[in-house]
Image (cartoon, rainbow, N blue to C red):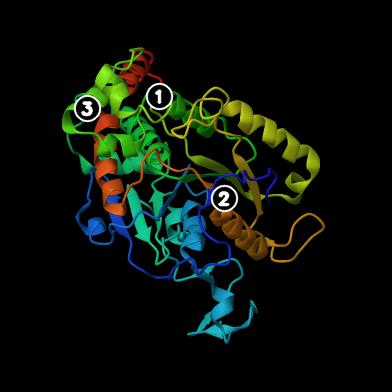
């Protein structure tokens, strides 16, 4: 359920009545399980057109990220494919239709077997491109014990900048969060509890460490020499932008930063969370969480970022409408429509889809070499504190 009004001065990301994708279509890797770039397959799915929207998702393990992204991709409910009737008791291919489950979801959700093993489903970053030029980024869980276990099992040598596998997972989580926040028009932030302190701390830290990371369009369209100057400035904490960097970004606010539209989704909420008092508290909490970070800082368009949008979803078992919500499926469909109708924050300069992918490659390298993140990591190593 939406509890904050959307800004209407910018261009909508997608018409709410548009066909939003083809379920079961191909998903391509952007980052693999080792957090290494894999762009060859994805590049073949991208075009030179500039009218596209990038939507990413972040959250902890098992909170429903892949399900929400599959809804945005156009996946339908299982109950809708049994003779077109939304009954939870009909059969299809010998299987009982279950309310709240998607038929052939674009992004594979966590199965019961995976959940019982306390394992994670998505590894790295998966990407799906819809016919309407929605580029959807599904990510692995942040600070996941399951990701930590898989990292230990791989028995590969640790990078020089980390001291332990725990340190590696924390660093990878921070890098993925910084990347998604830097290259997406809309970032969906999913949690399944009213307050998750660890998750909010990670999000706030990622936003803080992104300070001076340039707008992706400035990074990808800058000449080699100027691009190097911008990258150097971004990796020099507390520095003043060089003349070449300012020349490239003279059309936008300095520092050359980009802030995406943020939308918090609270999944599996009890009915008591839908009443006014908790909703008001959530507004205040999320606004203060990002206060001074995404909020109040100049964006690439010269505007000040507004408060994030906040939505609530009931549990999947809540199939019927109540006095405070309309049931899981209807609320999820409304969430999908409202997310797609949110205003899109433009990058500083026009980009084609393939330009965007080239920018992602440069952005990932810039984040990997970020001086802010390196200093933060070393400080945590001294304290043996990894979020």
Depth-wise, is mark 2 or mark 3 nearer the camera?
3
Assign a secondary structure to mark 3.
Answer: helix
On screen, residue 230 versus residue 59, left or right, reads left
In this view, the residue in front, 170 or 134, is 134
Depth-wise, is mark 1 or mark 3 nearer the camera?
3
Label 1, label 2: how far apart the Cα atoms are: 26 Å
- Does residue 220 sit above or below 19 in this rendering? above
**Which mark is first along the chain, 3 or 2?**
3
Question: Do tag 1 and tag 3 residues touch (Cβ < 8 Å)?
Answer: no
Q: Quadrant of the C terminus?
A: top left
List the residue tagged with mark 1: 209
List the residue tagged with mark 2: 342
On screen, residue 121 versus residue 287, left or right, reads left
Assign a secondary structure to mark 1.
Answer: helix
Task: For residue 125, say whether it is visible.
Answer: yes
Tag on residue 226? Answer: 3
């Amino acid at each position: 359920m939406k509890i904050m009004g959307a800004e209407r001065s910018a261009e909508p990301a997608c018409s709410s009545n548009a066909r939003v994708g083809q379920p079961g279509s191909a998903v391509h890797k952007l980052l693999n399980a080792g957090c290494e770039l894999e762009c060859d397959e994805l590049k073949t799915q991208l075009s030179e057109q500039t009218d596209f929207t990038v939507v990413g998702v972040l959250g902890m393990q098992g909170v429903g990220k892949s399900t929400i992204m599959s809804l945005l991709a156009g996946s339908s409910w299982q109950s809708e494919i049994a003779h077109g009737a939304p009954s939870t008791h009909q059969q299809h291919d010998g299987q009982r239709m279950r309310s709240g489950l998607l038929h052939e979801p674009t992004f594979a959700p966590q199965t019961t077997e995976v959940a019982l093993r306390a394992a994670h489903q998505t590894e790295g970053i998966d990407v799906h491109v819809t016919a309407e030029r929605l580029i959807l980024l599904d990510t692995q869980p942040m600070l996941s014990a399951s990701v930590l276990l898989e990292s230990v099992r791989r028995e590969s040598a640790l990078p020089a900048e980390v001291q332990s596998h725990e340190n590696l997972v924390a660093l990878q989580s921070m890098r993925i969060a910084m990347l998604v926040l830097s290259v997406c028009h809309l970032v969906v932030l999913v949690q399944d509890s009213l307050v998750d302190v660890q998750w909010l701390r990670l999000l706030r830290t990622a936003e803080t460490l992104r300070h001076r990371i340039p707008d992706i369009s400035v990074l990808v369209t800058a000449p080699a020499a100027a691009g190097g100057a911008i990258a150097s400035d971004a990796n020099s904490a507390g520095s003043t932008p060089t003349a070449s960097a300012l020349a490239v970004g003279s059309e936008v606010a300095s520092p050359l930063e980009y802030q995406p539209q943020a939308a918090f989704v609270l999944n599996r909420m009890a009915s008591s969370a839908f009443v006014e008092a908790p909703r008001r508290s959530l507004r205040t909490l999320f606004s203060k969480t990002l206060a001074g970070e995404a909020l109040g800082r100049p964006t690439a368009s010269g505007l000040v970022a507004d408060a994030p949008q906040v939505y609530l979803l009931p549990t999947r078992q809540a199939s019927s409408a109540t006095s405070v919500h309309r049931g899981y499926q209807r609320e999820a469909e409304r969430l999908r429509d409202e997310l797609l109708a949110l205003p899109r924050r433009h990058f500083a300069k026009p980009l084609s889809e393939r330009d965007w992918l080239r920018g992602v490659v440069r952005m990932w390298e810039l984040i990997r070499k970020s001086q802010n993140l390196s200093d933060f990591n070393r400080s945590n190593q001294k304290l043996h504190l990894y979020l």
